[in-house]
Image: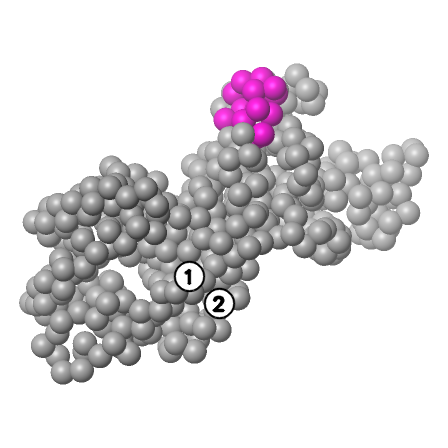
Amino acid sequence: MLRIGLTGGMGAGKSTVSRTLADLGAVVVDADKIAREVVEPGTPGLAALVERFGGDILADDGSLNRPALAAKAFGDEESRLALNGILHPLIGQRTTELVNSAPPDCVLVHDIPLLVESRTAAAFHLVVVVHVEAEERVRRLVASRGLNEDDARARIAAQATDEQRRAAADVWLDNSGTPEALEAIVREFWADRLELFAANLRSETVAWAAPRVVPADPMWPAEAQRAIDRVRLACGDRAIRIDHIGSTAVPGFPAKDVLDIQVTVADLATADALRDPLSAATFPRIEHITADDPKPSAVPGEADPALWEKRLHGAADPGRPVNIHLRVDGYPGQVFALMFRDRLRADPAAREAYLEVKTRAAARAAEHGEYADAIEAYVGEKAPYFDSVYPDVVEWADRTGWTAD
């Protein structure tokens, strides 16, 4: 099941996105709709609200008078907490029921207005944010919902900022145009990304990226952090540490547009036990890669192939290629990944030398049409460089007092 978190500020246009996704075949779980359902007349939820806040929160027809409830529930912190204590368990229970009843291989869209505020982004395989500038949202709220301008501004101010939403967003949908324009964007997003993502997840297939070196993307650190948050949730306490490694972890450094994440584990048995949790989190195992190439070393035994074993996962999401390396704590490959990243961060000459190697490797890869041949050429071109640079990186670490903090 591919789980999509859909959010955006009031008046941003989430309803258009969720309706379009539903038309395309997604199963939509609407948090606002659930919140209304659990307090309909005759429900335990409405009875609990009346018991706590009084019968004057009811309209003449016995339904909930929301403005009357708001006047009481948001007057003080105790009342607000009491409201949440009644509603949140009911909403959670109903949400679970709907999720459990959805087809196991569906695209499940959770429409959650306060997804960012609740800090639950990592629980979703992809977070989609619908965005409109605040002034336009105020205009829409006044025109379509009958709010006065001050009330609209106050409600928008009480929600997450655009910067907070950007940090959580894997996909940023601009809804500054017409509803028809937004619907077209959503349909394109479904065809170009979501359908393939869901198919890859079902078949445990990794979405590969061509080995091309591109200019540094300032979004790489934030994208890596979102991947780390999802990996951490899947691994739980079985991960000793999780790090953004590789060229995309070096600010301003050109690289392949593939994030490299290292999960440090206690042993390979732990790495193997994480196969299914990571696959379920949309990071399938790449079964045929089980080790790094041992590097020449002056340290006795350090070139032992057994010490360079690892497990490798990739991303099913075609829109964000990721490599997840599971390495054993203290093994030379685990240490070298951190050491090499930090050497690049600290040494401009080292970056220049490595960029020359990567550029040459990408040119070799471009000579091949098939991905497997291209990546073999790319990796093969870089292998002698890593053999030669390994002692230099170790020497740099010893000389500078480097530690894997």
- Dominant SS type (magenta): helix
Residues in magenta, as a range: 174-187
Label of residue 401 in the image: none
The kind of residue on which mark 2 rests is Arg
Q: Nearer the viewer, mark 1 or mark 2?
A: 1
Residue 104: x, y in percent? Answer: 67, 54
Asked if the residue under mark 2 is in contact with the one under mark 1, i.e. CB atoms within 8 Å, the reply is no
Give the Cα distance between marks 1 and 2: 10 Å
Q: Residues within 10 Å of mark 1 (few under 14, many from 20)?
A: some
Q: Residues within 10 Å of mark 2 (few under 14, many from 20)?
A: many
Q: Is residue 176 magenta?
A: yes
Residue at 49 percent of width and 62 percent of height: 278
Q: Does the magenta stretch include residue 196?
A: no
Residue position marked by numbered label 1 in the rendering:
286
Q: Which one is earlier in the sequence, the residue at label 1 or at label 2?
A: 2
Q: Is residue 53 left or right of residue 220?
A: right
Residue 325: x, y in percent? Answer: 35, 63
Residue position marked by numbered label 2 in the rendering:
275
Residue 364: x, y in percent? Answer: 20, 45
Badge 1 marks a residue whose secondary structure is loop
Above or below, 77 against 145 in this view is below
